[in-house]
Structures are given as C-alpha cells and as structure tokens.
Image: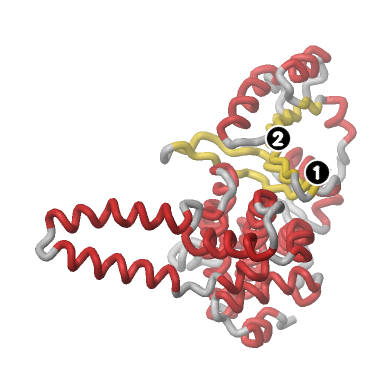
C-alpha cells in the first residue's frame, strides 16, 4: 500500500500523533464529540497515559496548521472543550510563533506547542511508512462495498472513538466489547474481508483495554475478590450497577402494574426474565481475568499494542504479538463463546 499525501492539517495531526505515540501515550485521532444528539466538533488528538497504578491522565490536543491559526481563540476553545469531555490537560499545537501566545496559554493552564516546536517535527513522512493514517484506515474499511449495509463497519469504528469523549466507564467498555464481538464474528463469517475485520477488531479492543485500565484505577485499593466482584457487576449491569438497574426496572414496571390487565403478574414475569437474562451472562469469566494484578499491570501496554497492530501498514495477526495481548483476546473469545481454535485458524492465515 503506497503512502498517500494527506490534506494540509491532517499531516500535522499525524506528525503529532507519531510524536505522542513515541512518548508513550495511547493516541486516538479525530474523536467526535456530540452533545445531546448534536455534532459539536472533533477532538484532533485524544491522549491517554498511565502515570502510575493510581493515576491516569486524559489530554486533548487542538491542532491548527493554517496561515492565520488564531491561536489565542483556539486556547479558549480547547479549554472549554477539555472541561466538556473531562480531560485533565489541554494542549494547543499551532504554527503561530508569537511569545504572547505561549504566555496566554500558560495563564490559562494550556500547554502551547508553538511554531518553533512544530517546525522541529519531522518533515518527512517516514512515520507513515510503517503506520496507516486515519484516512487510510477508514478508506480500507470503505473498500468493503457492503460494509454500510452489513452492520455499518466504518460507523461503528467512528462511534466507538466517540465514546472516549463521553467519559470512560463500564457503559463505554460494554459497548466497546460488543463492537469487538461484532468484528470477531465478521472475521469468521467474511473470509474475503478477514484483514479489515481483524483491524477493526483489534482497534475496538484497544479502546476496550484503555477503558479497563481506567476502571482499574478506581479499584486499585480493593483486594482481589472485591475487585473481581466489582468488575463482574459492572460488566453485567453497566455503570448503574445491579441496584441501579433494579431500581430503573421497578420504576418502569410500576406503570405496567398500574395500567395493564393483570399488571402485577405481568410485571413479576418481566422482572424475573430481565434479571435472569442479566445473571446468565458469563461475565465472571472476564471479571476474574481482569481482576488479576498481573493483567492490570499490562493492560495499558496491551491497548497500545492492539492499536499499533490495527494500524500497522504491514498487516500481521495477533499470533505474532505479545502473550499478554493474546491472553486478552483469548479471554474475550471464551466470554463470547467463540472457539479459540476456529478463530485462530481464520485469523492466522498468511
């Protein structure tokens, strides 16, 4: 696959992404931010770092590569956006070289990467020799002509990235897990699209791994059994937990009890069925796995590795990746009741 020239601005975003990846961050580009159904903007770069077992940091980067970048206005904009998406830090990268811009950013606690810094970024596209740009990744997905009808492959990837801007928690993790399951099934059922399906599988799973790492920060003080129980409950019931779901269910079914014929009997049956469906989920498999301290220590590294495998220009399956990455995939395949051997026989075809 040949390296394509990206539009002005996008090239700078990719250069900065390469810089932050090399600095140890997990980086997502073009993260859509919505508010109550309205498309507000895209976050140019969304950065995630694990500072320690007790500290995680989310940073957003606003990138402007224009003749008149209006850097001071962008500082205001980025500061407000950071608050809306619960980011810890804000960075504005601009071609503007005025010292006043950096001073203004400092006053507002915004790091400004000015034109002096930007000019030092690699002017070559060497980093694109090994990695796909976001545009190329989406173009690969578009190469599957039935992708829109067959579950909207590209749409699922874009929406998955958008969850980063909504706040990371069990609800987001459960959605990422469902998207990953979807693409795992596509690997098995669409052999002609094996590579693209695997790339999407790895990418969505990288987002899930970031989410698990973020959640584990809040559970770091718990012992193993408590941590496992919290994970099982979250993966089963979402961020509301069992009590929240039970309360919501009771509120909803109270209307049935009041207005439907034989309302109490119907309500009782529905309640029992819904709770039984939740409790039948084999979430103990993933809860037990991700509660292990040795898994918690490496899940951030696995997230970065999965993203790299998904975006690698020279495609390779996860069988050439670390044992930790393969362990995460194996655990989820077990949870989804997808035979590891069947999946491997398809995924590992040269």
Q: Which mark is residue 20?
A: 1
Residue 114, percent from left and from top: 81, 25
The residue under label 2 is 61
Position of residue 178 relative to residue 167, above or below, is below
- Which residue is drawn at the image coordinates 27% and 53% (left, top)? 252
Image-based side of 242 in relation to 315, left or right: left
Residue 316, percent from left and from top: 76, 72
Residue 164, percent from left and from top: 59, 46
Q: Looking at the rendering, in which quadrant would you find the N terminus?
A: bottom right
Q: Which of 283 and 87 is in front in this view?
A: 283
**Is residue 2 something one can see in this rendering?**
no
Q: Nearer the viewer, residue 212 or 164?
A: 212
Image-based side of 249 in relation to 292, left or right: left
Position of residue 318 relative to residue 61, above or below, is below
Q: Residue 302: name its quadrant.
A: bottom right
- Which residue is drawn at the image coordinates 30% and 55% (left, top)? 250
Image-based side of 98 in relation to 284, left or right: right
Residue 145, percent from left and from top: 51, 66
Question: Would you call the spot at circle 2 few (<14 residues within 10 Å), some (14-19), or many (20 or more)?
Answer: many
Image-based side of 180 in relation to 270, left or right: right
Position of residue 172 relative to residue 122, above or below, is below
Q: Which of 291 and 209 is in front in this view?
A: 291
- Which residue is drawn at the image coordinates 52% and 52% (left, top)? 159
Q: Residue 310 carries which label?
A: none
Question: Would you call the spot at circle 1 few (<14 residues within 10 Å), some (14-19), or many (20 or more)?
Answer: some
Marks 2 and 1, the one that precedes in the sequence: 1
Badge count: 2
Label 1 SS: helix
The answer for how far apart the CA atoms under marks 2 and 1 are is: 10 Å
Cβ–Cβ below 8 Å for labels 2 and 1?
yes
């Amino acid at each position: 696959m040949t390296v394509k020239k990206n539009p002005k601005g996008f090239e700078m975003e990719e250069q900065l992404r390469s810089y932050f990846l090399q600095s140890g961050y997990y980086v997502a580009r073009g993260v859509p931010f919505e508010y109550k159904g309205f498309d507000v903007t895209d976050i140019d770069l969304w950065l995630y770092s694990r500072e320690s077992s007790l500290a995680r940091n989310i940073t957003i980067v606003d990138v402007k590569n224009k003749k008149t970048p209006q850097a001071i206005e962008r500082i205001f904009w980025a500061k407000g956006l950071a608050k809306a998406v619960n980011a810890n830090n804000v960075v504005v990268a601009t071609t503007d070289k005025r010292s006043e811009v950096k001073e203004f950013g400092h006053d507002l606690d915004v790091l400004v990467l000015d034109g002096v810094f930007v000019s030092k970024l690699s002017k070559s596209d060497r980093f694109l020799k090994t990695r796909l740009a976001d545009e190329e990744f989406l173009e690969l997905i578009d190469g599957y002509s039935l992708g829109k009808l067959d579950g909207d492959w590209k749409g699922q990837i874009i929406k998955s990235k958008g969850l980063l801007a909504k706040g990371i928690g069990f609800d987001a993790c459960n959605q990422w897990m469902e998207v990953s399951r979807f693409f795992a099934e596509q690997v098995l059922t669409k052999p002609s699209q094996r590579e693209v399906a695997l790339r999407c599988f790895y990418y969505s799973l990288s987002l899930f791994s970031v989410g698990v790492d973020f959640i584990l920060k809040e559970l770091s003080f718990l012992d193993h059994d408590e941590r496992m129980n919290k994970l099982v409950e979250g993966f089963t019931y979402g961020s509301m937990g069992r009590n929240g779901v039970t309360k919501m269910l009771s509120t909803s079914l109270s209307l049935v009890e009041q207005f439907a014929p034989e309302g109490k009997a119907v309500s009782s049956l529905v309640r029992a069925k819904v709770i039984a469906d939740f409790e039948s989920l084999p979430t103990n498999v993933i809860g037990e796995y991700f509660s292990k301290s040795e898994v918690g220590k490496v899940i951030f590294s696995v997230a970065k590795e999965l993203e790299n495998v998904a975006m690698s220009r020279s495609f390779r399956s996860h069988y050439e990746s670390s044992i930790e990455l393969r362990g995460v995939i194996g655990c989820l395949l077990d949870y989804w009741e997808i035979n590891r051997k069947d999946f491997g026989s398809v995924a590992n075809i040269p």
